[in-house]
C-alpha cells in the first residue's frame, strides 16, 4: 500500500467519558502531532466535558459532541472508538464510510471469523468486509501491517500482555504450544467506568476472584496470535482474576520446554533479540521479575522468565497497565504507525512510581 506521512492529525474520541476515552485524552494532551478536536458522547452531548471530569479543567474546554459521523468528519481526520463491544461494530462502518480513519478499542473487529466472534462475545458479528478491512494492531508483533491502514482494531488488554510474553518462545519452537497455561490478574478499571456489582468496592476490596473461567472472550484472540507464532492452531488454558487494584495486568504463563537443556539466560537473550529496537518491551535480567507498579501509567510491557530444570517448564511473567499498553497507549502507538510516524511519539513517559 502506498502511504504518504502527514505531519498532524485532528482526533475525535467516541466514548470519551469512559476510562479508555479519558486515558486517550490524558495521553494525547502530550502528543506532539495529534490534537483532540472532538470529544463525543452518546448520553451527555452539549454538556461541558470538564464538568464530569474536574481533573481535566482548563485542559479540555470543549462541550461533548453528539455521535454524528458527518459533524465529526468536519472536525477530525481520525476517530478512536472507546466504546463497548456491540457498539463499535455499528459505529465503525459509519465513520469509515464518512471518510475518517478509525482505531477501535473494542473486541468487535479483532477476530476474523464471525462464528468465533458470536461464540465468545454472544453478539452478532460485524460484516465480513469490515472484519477483513480491520488490521489487528499488535504493534510489536504485526506493526508493519498497520502502516497506511485506515482501520485498526486495537488488541485486548490480556492478549497484549500474554502474547508479547509468549510469542518469541513459541515462534522459536522453544516451548510446546500445546502445554501453555495462562494465569492472568487484572485491576478493576479493566471492567470500565460503568457501574456493575462485580466492581463494587466491597466485592473487590480484600478479595481475589477468578472470573469467566473457560469462557473469557480473549481466549480466541490469544490463540489467533499464537497460531501465527506456531504456524498451526494452538489451544490454551486461560484464567482471569480480579484483584483489588485500579490499574495493571499480570499474566503468568507456564509451558513445557521442547529442549530441557535450555536455560533462563538463553530465553532472556532470545527475547532481547526478538524485541531489539522495540522501546515498549523491556526484558528483565534473569532472576528479576516485573511487578504491575513498574509499568503503572506507562506504555511499557515488562517481561521476566525462569526455567525450572527440575520440571522442564518455563514460567514467563508479563505486566502492562491495562489502560495504557492494554488500551489507549497501544491505540496511540497504532495511530503513530498508521500515520507513518515514529511509533513512540507522545508515549515515552516514565511509569508512575511509587
Ligand atoms: N478498560 C480497559 O482496561 C480496557 C477497555 N477496552 C475496551 O475499550 C472499550 C472502552 O472501554 P472502557 O473505556 O473501559 O469502557 P467504559 O464503560 O468506561 O466506557 C465506554 C463508553 O462508551 C460510551 N458508549 C456507551 N454506549 C454507547 C453508544 N451506544 N454509542 C456511543 N458511545 C457509547 C459511554 O459514554 P457515553 O455514555 O458518554 O456515550 C461510555 O463512557 C471497550 O470496548 C473495552 O472492552 C480494551 C482494553 C482495556
Ligand atoms: C476486569 C474486567 O472485567 N476486565 C475485562 C477486560 C476486557 C476489556 O477491557 O475489553 P476488551 O475485550 O476490549 O479488551 C474482562 O475481563 O472482560
Image: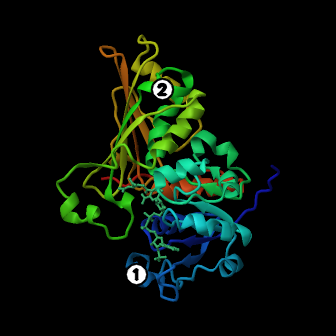
Kindly identify the residue that appears in the image at 53 percent across and 29 percent down.
168
Residue 69 position, x and y percent, is: 66, 77
Mark number, residue 37? none
* Whole-number angstrom distance, CA of label 1 to CA of label 2: 46 Å
Residue 35 position, x and y percent, is: 61, 71
User: Measured along the vertical axis of the image, is residue 9 above or below residue 183?
Assistant: below
Residue 324 position, x and y percent, is: 46, 55
Kindly identify the residue that appears in the image at 49 percent across and 24 percent down.
269
User: Measured along the vertical axis of the image, is residue 226 above or below residue 258?
Assistant: below
> Pointer 2: residues within 10 angstroms few (<14), some, or many (20+)?
many
Q: How is the image coloured?
A: rainbow
According to the picture, the residue beneath numbered tag 2 turns out to be 177
Q: Secondary structure at mark 1?
A: helix
> Which of the pair 84/266 is nearer the observer?
84
**Horizontal side, residue 5 vs residue 160: left or right:** right
According to the picture, the residue beneath numbered tag 1 turns out to be 52
Amino acid at each position: 500500500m502506498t502511504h504518504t506521512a502527514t505531519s498532524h492529525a485532528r482526533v475525535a474520541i467516541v466514548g470519551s467519558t469512559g476510562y479508555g476515552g479519558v486515558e486517550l485524552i490524558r495521553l494525547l494532551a502530550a502528543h506532539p502531532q495529534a490534537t483532540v478536536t472532538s470529544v463525543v458522547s452518546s448520553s451527555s452531548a452539549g454538556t461541558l466535558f470538564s464538568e464530569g471530569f474536574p481533573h481535566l479543567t482548563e485542559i479540555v474546554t470543549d462541550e461533548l459532541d453528539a455521535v454524528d459521523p458527518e459533524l465529526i468528519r468536519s472536525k477530525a481526520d481520525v476517530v478512536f472508538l472507546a466504546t463497548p463491544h456491540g457498539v463499535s461494530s455499528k459505529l465503525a462502518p459509519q465513520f469509515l464510510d464518512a471518510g475518517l480513519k478509525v482505531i477501535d478499542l473494542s473486541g468487535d473487529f479483532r477476530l476474523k471469523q464471525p462464528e468465533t466472534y458470536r461464540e465468545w462475545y454472544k453478539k452478532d458479528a460485524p460484516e465480513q468486509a469490515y472484519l477483513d478491512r480491520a488490521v489487528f494492531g499488535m504493534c510489536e508483533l504485526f506493526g508493519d501491517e498497520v502502516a497506511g491502514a485506515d482501520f485498526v482494531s486495537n488488541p485486548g488488554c490480556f492478549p497484549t500482555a500474554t502474547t508479547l510474553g509468549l510469542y518469541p518462545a513459541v515462534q522459536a519452537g522453544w516451548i510446546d504450544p500445546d502445554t501453555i497455561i495462562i494465569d492472568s490478574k487484572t485491576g478493576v478499571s479493566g471492567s470500565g467506568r460503568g457501574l456493575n456489582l462485580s466492581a463494587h468496592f466491597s466485592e473487590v476490596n480484600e478479595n481475589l476472584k477468578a472470573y469467566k473461567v473457560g469462557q473469557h472472550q480473549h481466549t480466541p484472540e490469544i490463540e489467533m496470535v499464537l497460531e501465527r507464532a506456531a504456524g498451526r492452531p494452538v489451544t490454551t488454558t486461560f484464567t482471569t482474576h480480579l484483584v483489588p487494584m485500579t490499574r495493571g495486568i499480570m499474566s503468568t504463563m507456564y509451558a513445557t520446554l521442547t529442549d530441557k537443556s535450555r536455560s533462563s539466560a538463553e530465553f532472556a537473550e532470545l527475547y532481547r533479540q526478538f524485541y531489539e529496537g522495540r522501546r515498549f518491551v523491556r526484558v528483565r535480567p534473569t532472576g528479576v521479575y516485573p511487578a504491575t507498579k513498574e509499568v503503572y501509567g506507562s506504555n511499557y510491557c515488562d517481561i521476566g522468565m525462569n526455567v525450572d530444570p527440575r520440571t522442564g517448564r518455563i514460567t514467563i511473567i508479563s505486566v502492562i497497565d491495562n489502560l495504557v499498553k492494554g488500551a489507549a497507549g497501544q491505540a496511540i502507538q497504532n495511530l503513530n504507525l498508521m500515520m507513518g510516524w515514529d511509533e513512540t511519539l507522545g508515549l515515552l513517559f516514565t511509569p508512575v512510581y511509587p
